[in-house]
């Protein structure tokens, strides 16, 4: 096989069917990984935008009742922080409608509702992150399996030859090594994206947990005055 026949395409076409199957699997995984990366990129950007918009409204001086009415009306397009706020307000108002006046019970109920909503929201935000982690960790080993199988297949073919030279060995080894290259091609972007998204998701979680504490403090202050007072700022 001359140099022109050592192109990536020719190496793939001349590889054994097992190695070709491994390459096809890795290419499919790579495409799915890139699709997940772009979806997660846009999803996290949208979460940040919606959370920032709601937090701006929250600290703008609007009453809690008005914010809650807006959150209920905008439920389908609301961001995670707005839904967490709505959960807390919903539970708070339900408890007050049941004539519960104990401040501790009201605050605990609102906090539990917000915590449950927070967990649901984080489950959504963290979706597909485990897939990227799996691609990052497994793809190199799948590629290595293809390489080992290809090398075994190549050396089996050399068994009947009287004279084995570099020219006869190189194509078979090169075909096998392409599987490892494709495995790394699938794994490296997934590793980078996983680390980036994990860091961004941690920031989102901290931001939302901070909001829960701030809103809880506002409710606690308002329990002694008026249940729908205006947030007083950071």
Image (spheres, grey):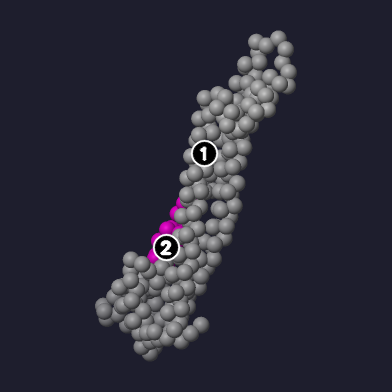
**Could you tell me if residue 22 is visible in this image?**
yes
Q: At numbered mark 2, what does the secondary structure look like: helix, strand or loop?
A: helix
- Residue furthest left as drawn: 98
Q: Which residues are magenta?
A: 115-130
Q: Residue 152 appears at what percent x and percent y?
A: 62, 22
| Front in this rendered view, residue 87 or 127 | 127
Image coordinates for residue 31, horizontal then vertical, percent: 49, 44
Q: Residue at x 40, y 71 (%)?
A: 82
Crowding around mark 2 (Cα neighbors within 10 Å: few <14, some 14 to 19, many 20+) is some
Between residues 6 and 41, which one lies in front from this camera angle? 6
Quick check: 42 above or below 140?
A: below
**Residue under pointer 1:** 27
Q: Is residue 176 visible?
A: no
Any magenta on residue 47? no
Q: Residue at x 30, y 80 (%)?
A: 96
The residue labelled by disc 2 is: 121
Closer to the camera, 70 or 176? Answer: 176
Q: Main secondary structure of the magenta part?
A: helix
């Amino acid at each position: 096989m001359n140099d022109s026949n050592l192109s990536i395409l020719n190496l793939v076409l001349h590889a054994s069917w097992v190695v070709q199957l491994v390459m096809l699997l890795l290419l499919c995984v790579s495409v799915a990984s890139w699709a997940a990366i772009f979806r997660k990129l846009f999803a996290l950007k949208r979460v940040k935008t919606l959370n920032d918009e709601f937090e701006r409204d929250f600290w703008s001086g609007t009453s809690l009742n008005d914010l809650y009415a807006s959150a209920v009306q905008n439920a389908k397009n609301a961001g995670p922080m707005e839904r967490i706020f709505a959960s807390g307000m919903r539970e708070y108002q339900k408890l007050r409608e049941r004539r519960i006046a104990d401040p501790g019970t009201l605050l605990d109920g609102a906090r539990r509702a917000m915590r449950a909503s927070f967990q649901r929201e984080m489950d959504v935000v963290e979706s597909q992150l485990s897939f990227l982690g799996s691609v990052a960790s497994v793809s190199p080993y799948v590629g290595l399996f293809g390489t080992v199988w290809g090398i075994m297949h190549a050396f089996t073919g050399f068994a009947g030859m009287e004279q084995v030279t570099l020219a006869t060995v190189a194509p078979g080894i090169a075909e096998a090594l392409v599987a490892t290259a494709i495995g790394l091609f699938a794994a490296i972007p997934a590793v980078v994206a996983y680390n980036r998204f994990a860091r961004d998701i941690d920031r989102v979680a901290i931001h939302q947990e901070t909001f829960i504490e701030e809103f809880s403090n506002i409710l606690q202050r308002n329990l002694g005055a008026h249940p729908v007072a205006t947030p007083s700022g950071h």
